[in-house]
Amino acid sequence: MNIASLSTEQSPPISFPFSFFALAPLFLPLAAVMLALGEGNPFAETHSPALLAATHCITLGFMAAVMFGAVQQILPVLVGSKMPAARLVARFTLPALFAGTLALCGGFMRGQPLWFNLAWILLGPALLTFTGASLISLARAPANNATRSAILLAVIALAIAGSIGGLLAHGFATGAALPYPEWLVAHAGFSLGGWVMLLIAGVSYQVVPMFQLTPNYPKWLTAALAPALFVLLLAGFLPLLFGTAARPLTLAAESLYWLLAVIFAGVTLNLQSRRRRRVPDATLSFFRLGMVSLICAALFAFAATLCPAAHTAFRTLSALAFLLGFAMSVVNGMLYKIIPFLVWFHLFRGGMKSGIPNMKQIIPEPWMWWHYRLQWATLLAATGAPFLDRAAWLVAAGLSLQGFLLGAGVFKSIAVYRKHVRQINRAQA
Amino acid sequence: MESIITLDVCGLPPPEPFVRIMAALETLPAGSALQVRIHREPFPLYDVLRENGFAWQTATPADGNFQILIHHAA
């Protein structure tokens, strides 16, 4: 069996995703720096510059970077289609994404048009390149399953969110008269509720049963969830067309969206409770924490609607539970599964038949558990962040430490991979 | 008539299915076929099979698992 001579055409080189994975954690301490530079408690006001800068460090610098790297690798595995011109896409999107995120942070913190202009000029082409390449890959995919549909809708949602984000950045730079509150709601909806939620759902349909040894997701859920969520997100445009007259309809759409999100989280938790191998697993715990956080995000959103007096505080808590609790926990859990698997897979395809490290040895399990506990502590602090300055500082500290711990795990994996590649090279010499 | 060796890797976590299939193919006699039962469609495996001179047919029985019949390409 000639594994060593395999073309790397079908599976992008490991250096592509690892470049994204290695740099992305740096944006977590950077988010903490943004929070520290803000005036007073940045969490007390939903649109404070420091909170917006920190949010984009997490959503773009950390989360989008990890997802861009992961999507490039998982498309061939989950839907059987590689990304076209993967090398070019990675080499262009990585610097443009990171530089654009830094420019956007500069824009929020300094309020200068130059930074906002630089941000949309860099981020626009980066997002366009990634979404274009992903759509081509998905169009060519031989698999026509629910994962493909969900990822397709996630990428379309990213394109919409990115376009609105570019429009807003351009508006901030030029001072153009735009209906900013309505566009901001649509931007947040399509980026978090669209891109993040749909991608996590689509990938979960396969990754949860595959890695966590659970039964498959029920077909009624995988067939209907992503299209239904996407249609409900479109209701976010109604206020732009009909103003306050659309309020009852958008409220109904939002409530239905959260209800579906709770159903997804509940089904996932139920499947995980029926897993075949009942051994403690940090990645599974991250996933479960993510699903519980998604339910909390929905409850806070309902509370915001039912309790107008505390509307802003509940909105902030809902956003924190979704972003830090749901999205970050699941992304961390997936990373800790994907990274060891990629190292193993690339070593195997590189020609190593024996002596490949066990997947559990690539990133030390205790590190993952420490990270998991740190994530819990960060989330507990986040529940008090809108009200207590000290809690806000703890969130910032938690994000920093998480970034360093995750970064150390990625670099440990790269070191393991390089060590074994040297062994392969010596054996072949 | 070719003999068929069966291999059930349903429910095994990654990378076990891949490892077991590759090990079985290492010793697959000429004229024989390997019938694999697996819980998800293993797209990366197809690349490896193609590059190593194997042909395959994939079927999806009613139970939702995939049946892949692998044999040496003519």
Image (cartoon, coloured by chain):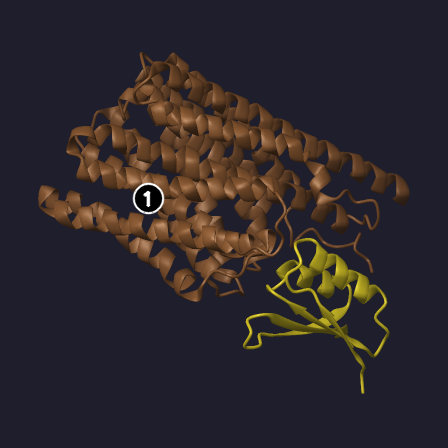
Q: Name the residue beneath numbered marker 1.
A: A190
| Number of numbered markers | 1
Q: Which chain is in yellow here?
A: B
Residue A249 seen in the figure: yes
Above-or-below relation of A391 to A261: above
Above-or-below relation of A352 to A174: below
Instruction: From the viewer's perspective, tell me whether residue A247 is left or right of residue B44.
Output: left
* Residue at the farthest bottom position: B1
Instruction: From the viewer's perspective, tell me whether residue A351 is left or right of residue A102.
Output: right
What's the amino acid at mark 1?
Phe
Q: Nearer the viewer, residue A352 or A6?
A: A352
Q: Which chain is in brown here?
A: A
Secondary structure under badge 1?
helix
Quadrant housing the C terminus of chain A? top right
The residue depicted at 49 percent of the width and 44 percent of the height is: A288
Q: Nearer the viewer, residue A402 or A135?
A: A402
Residue B25 percent across, percent down from the top left: 80, 66
Instruction: From the viewer's perspective, tell me whether residue A352 is left or right of residue A157.
Output: right
Above-or-below relation of A413 to A12: above
Give the chain of mark 1.
A
Residue A126 percent across, percent down from the top left: 45, 38
* Residue at the farthest left position: A245
Q: Nearer the viewer, residue A186 or A96?
A: A186
Residue A98 seen in the figure: no
